[in-house]
Amino acid sequence: MNIIGELITLRAIEISDLDMMQKWANDPSIQYMLGGWHFPTNKNDQEKWFENLSCNSMHQRFLAVDKDSAKVGMANLVNINFKDGNAELGLLLDPKFQGKGLGKDIVETLMKYSFEELRLNRLETSIIASNKPSLGLFLNKCNWTQEGILRNWYFRNGEFIDKIMLSILSYEYKELKK
Ligand SMILES: CC(C)(COP(=O)(O)OP(=O)(O)OC[C@H]1O[C@@H](n2cnc3c(N)ncnc32)[C@H](O)[C@@H]1OP(=O)(O)O)[C@@H](O)C(=O)NCCC(=O)NCCS
């Protein structure tokens, strides 16, 4: 079942999305902001990734589309732990669609889904300290809490950069809804 937000819909990833995803995977303006890293990715890499994409209940990856069905970005809920009730949330937007409130809608949509459908208790994310838009999104616009700093965790452009750990709990989400 698709997950419907105010501005975006989160749906399953299709093979026809791979060209767009390859573009995002090779775009330094996106990838420098993310925690992971990889060498340049070709179509074959994307297809192999897609073949191994497990649609299991532990790791969910979504394509985000807007009201015009434009492919605006991706989001994921991974390491979903139903025993302890937590998961990690991540997202990226195509540069064309950044700064329009879509990131906020994706995070809010996944909070609603996680807390009101999956009955999770906690969502967390980690952000590279230089990623001011993402920190602004989670801390200021979505009211997540900074839990800690892992010092010098990333190496980017010749410098070590801290990793910022953030989370939100189910009762905090319910308070926000009042
Ligand atoms: C991070 C991301 C998801 C944010 O989504 P978005 O829809 O573009 O978010 P917005 O730009 O509307 O909001 C981000 C907030 O960050 C702040 N912000 C944006 N750019 C900023 C900057 N350069 N410096 C400081 N704060 C900034 C603002 O508070 C802004 O809120 P505002 O609308 O009240 O001004 C999106 O920019 C993106 O996909 N970036 C590349 C990939 C990425 O970083 N993913 C997240 C990894 S943790």
Image (cartoon, grey):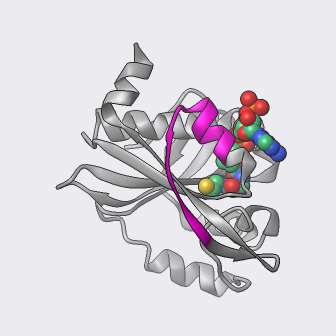
Q: Is residue 59 left or right of residue 104?
A: left
Q: Is residue 30 magenta?
A: no
Q: Residue placed at 50% from the left, 33% from the top?
A: 108
Q: Is residue 163 visible?
A: yes
Q: Nearer the viewer, residue 148 or 110?
A: 148
Image quadrant, ligand 1: top right
Q: Position of residue 166 (x, y in %)?
A: 50, 48
Q: Is residue 118 above or below residue 15?
A: above
Q: Position of residue 36 (x, y in %)?
A: 60, 73
Q: Is residue 13 above or below residue 43?
A: above
Q: Residue placed at 64% from the left, 39% from the top?
A: 137
Q: Residue placed at 70% from the left, 77% from the top?
A: 155
Q: Nearer the viewer, residue 144 or 114?
A: 144
Q: Position of residue 149 (x, y in %)?
A: 55, 58
Q: Is residue 47 left or right of residue 110?
A: right
- Screen quadrant of the C terminus: top left
Q: Is residue 27 above or below residue 167?
A: below
Q: Is residue 144 magenta?
A: yes
Image quadrant in which you'd find residue 157:
bottom right
Q: Position of residue 158 (x, y in %)?
A: 81, 80
- Screen quadrant of the N terminus: top left
Image quadrant in which you'd find residue 169:
top left
Q: Residue placed at 53% from the left, 32% from the top?
A: 143
State which region is magenta: 135-152
The residue at the far top in this view is 178
